[in-house]
Amino acid sequence: MKTGRQVHTISNLDEPQGAFYDAASNRLFEANGGDGTVKIFDGTTFQLLQTVTLDLDADNVRYDARSKHIVVGYGGEKFLAGKVARPGGGGALAILDSNGKIVGDIAMDAHPESFQLEKIGTRVFVNVPDKQEVEVADLTKGTVLARWPVTCTTNFPMALDEAHHRLFVGCRMPARLAVFNTDTGKIVASPAIVEHTDDLFFDASKGRIYILGEGFIEAWQEKDPDHYERIGRFPTPADGRTGLFVPDLGELFETIPHHSQQGAEILVYEIK
């Protein structure tokens, strides 16, 4: 991290997607969309310790600090650009312990995209774009509590401001940020944003939202829980739409894939 030098590569993965490193157990959990597995690696030697088979399209990975469980979204029919990218039934959230044992499974109505967990409560908010909704589930009970309609479509990325009871959902068609009141399930704001977003993050220390989209990163300021103002728009390579915000470092990382003459790289932005 200090030098920006790549130190190791884990190869022979079938469409790697989500990942989470558990410092307590020194294990890396990595989800694969191609074969629907979650692979668990030793965090020091990178040796493969275990393979957990779920279903097609194991995708986003989150950590539930309350229960010390790993949550993985997988399965379900998936549409992209109005066409069936992968057939199938309903999706689900798999709940694993630190040893990779499946201790729970919460059925979704279609493939779960980005999802966010409450730190104080037990709810998880899940983007289900094929149903054009956010599904709200209880991690303890293992059941869906509510389904909130999303007024825009292709709702992939999501972030949570738990302190102010606000959930941020990024849509592509049309390109809007749907802001939900998590107490009522109602949309309180929906400003137009950068096209084709695939990642967005909430900066609790500054009350900001960073949105990665087609050719730009946008910074939005939370004026109050119901009002938001765009305060910056920064050009980036056209294909850069995914990344990671690290609050402890005050840095935003954006991945740029290999495309034509453009080499694969990671861009690092300092948050001021």
Image (cartoon, rainbow, N blue to C red):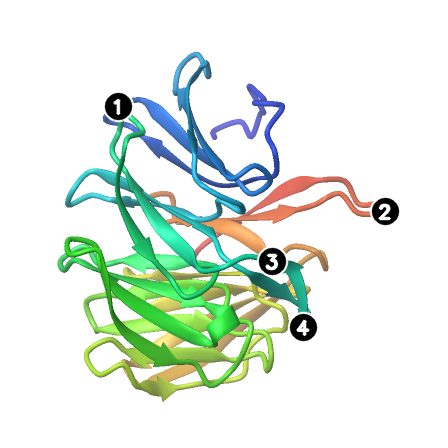
- In the rendered structure, which amino acid carries the disc numbered 3? Pro
Q: State which tag comes first along the sequence, 3 or 2.
A: 3
The residue wearing badge 1 is 25
- In the rendered structure, which amino acid carries the disc numbered 4? Gly
Mark 4 → mark 3, Cα distance in angstroms? 13 Å
Asked whether the beta carbons under mark 3 and mark 2 sit within 8 Å of each other, the answer is no
- Quadrant that contains the C terminus: bottom left
Mark 3 → mark 2, Cα distance in angstroms? 31 Å
Which quadrant of the structure image shows residue 81? Answer: bottom right
Asked whether the beta carbons under mark 2 and mark 1 sit within 8 Å of each other, the answer is no
Asked whether the beta carbons under mark 2 and mark 4 sit within 8 Å of each other, the answer is no
Q: State which tag comes first along the sequence, 4 or 1.
A: 1
The residue wearing badge 3 is 87
SS at mark 3 in the image: loop
Foreground: disc 2 or disc 4: 4
Foreground: disc 3 or disc 2: 3
Mark 2 → mark 1, Cα distance in angstroms? 40 Å
Residue at coordinates 59% horizontally, 22% vertically from top-left? 9
Position above or below: 179 against 269: below
* Within-10-Å neighbours for mark 2: few <14, some 14–19, many 20+: few
Which quadrant of the structure image shows residue 24? Answer: top left
